[in-house]
Amino acid sequence: MIQLVELSVNGERHDLAIEPRRTLVDVLRHDLGLTGTHVGCEHGICGACTVLVDGAPARACLIFAAQVEGAEIRTVESLSSDGELNDLQRCFSEHHGLQCGFCTPGMLMLAEGYLAEEPEPTTEEIREVVASNLCRCTGYQTIVEAIDDCAARRRAALQDRLDRRAS
Amino acid sequence: MKPAAFEYHRARSVSGAVGLLTELGDEAKIVAGGQSLVAMMNFRLARPEHLVDITHIDGLAGIRREGDTLRIGALTTHRAVEKADLGDFAVLSRAMRWVGHLPIRTRGTVGGSIAHADATAEWCLLAVLLEARILVEGPSGRREISAEEFFLGPFTTALEPDELIVELVFPRPAPRAALTEYADRKGDFALVAAAVDLDTDRIVLGGVGPVPAVVRGESYTGTTVRARAAAAADSLELRDEPGISAHYRRGLVRTLVERAYEEAARG
């Protein structure tokens, strides 16, 4: 059985003719060539395949692509623009929030989705959120620091814009 | 691994989904958030020939308060409950932090969790604790099943193969209730979960039997929290299992019931 699925990924529309058993992560990597999203355990434990579905972090290995027709999917490829890393990616780099890099796309999308919803997390809340994704290099400390710093910078930038508008 | 091949069917209404289930028979399975089912399919522990996708049905998600009653639509995600301001049903929001991890809670649904019927799952415990009713629809219409009669065994429920869960109905507020649990790693399935409601004097435990276990008042009389928790733990028949002794599990029950009491009293 072939299913026709119209998928919106990083603002681009794709018309797919796929088997219904094709998971979102396999579509992203094999059919669309978006290999930034990694695939690890394929049963929802490791979080390497985390992407945003309508803004919310989700495991792309636990979703059939046919199910998310009509949703807006965002992958790690959407973060940078014009070859420049975004602020979250720069924070990961500056704080050494990665070593081998395998978990990084999932961690980035997890943090991106989470910070959009919760711009003022406590360090403890960040620790709880990143517990969903496995990292076997960093010990998590530098990842938590990177996300913490990115949130602080975004708050400062927002405050700056508000101040300038007021003056 | 990759799942076995199946045919995909997208339902647009509850009656449409029931029609598909009736037509396709035993080889059909409903998929909603898929946070348990797709993992089982990837392992090929589940190999349904047909999947009926209900996530595109309008009106199955949402939380409604009607007087003392709270109604939660089957497609409501754990995350939506976690973020909702539920007033004297806040125990439900607070309990959601124990459900997997954030990216699981954004997809996993209340109805799916109840239908999956893992005996340690938070929703199964909460439904039994708060004497919820499960509203289901089948070919001959709708019926309500009480949570205590719904769970028949591990991953086994009173739901017929051609029925679909529509809504979870909580009949009365629970301002002094709490759920807590323990797992070796954050977000894992609980080794033991404990839920208490001070107003109804009920304790419900997960991880101590095939279904959420109700410990009734008479088996844990006592006037200190510690004595009651110990009595509840002692009332259970537990067996040594690989990696976890009955003694250890009983200790967990005691500790978790005490913690649940303390949290419930704080409200």
Image (spheres, rainbow, N blue to C red):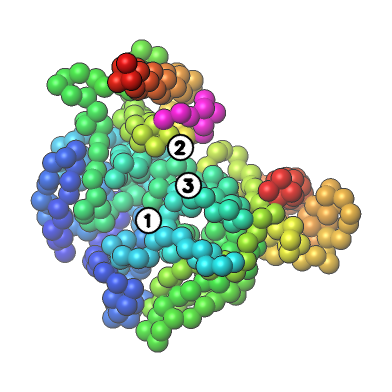
Left or right, residue A153 beside residue A10: right
Which residue is rendered at x = 34% and y = 38% of the image? Answer: A50
- Check disc 2 and report the residue beneath it: A132
Placement of B111 over or under B186, stated as above or below: below
Q: Which mark is residue B83?
A: 3
Placement of A83 over or under A77, stated as above or below: above
Q: Please say if the residues under marks 2 and 3 sit with CB atoms less than 8 Å apart.
A: no
Nearer the observer: mark 1 or 3; the answer is: 3
Q: Residue furthest front?
A: A167
User: Which percent across, then down, holds residue A25?
Assistant: 26, 43
Query: Which amino acid, by three-letter code, is at mark 2?
Result: Ser
User: Which percent across, then down, holds residue A99?
Assistant: 37, 18
Q: Which mark is residue B61?
A: none
- Check disc 1 and report the residue beneath it: B33
Which region of the structure is painted magenta? A119-128
User: Which percent across, then down, holds residue B52?
Assistant: 30, 67
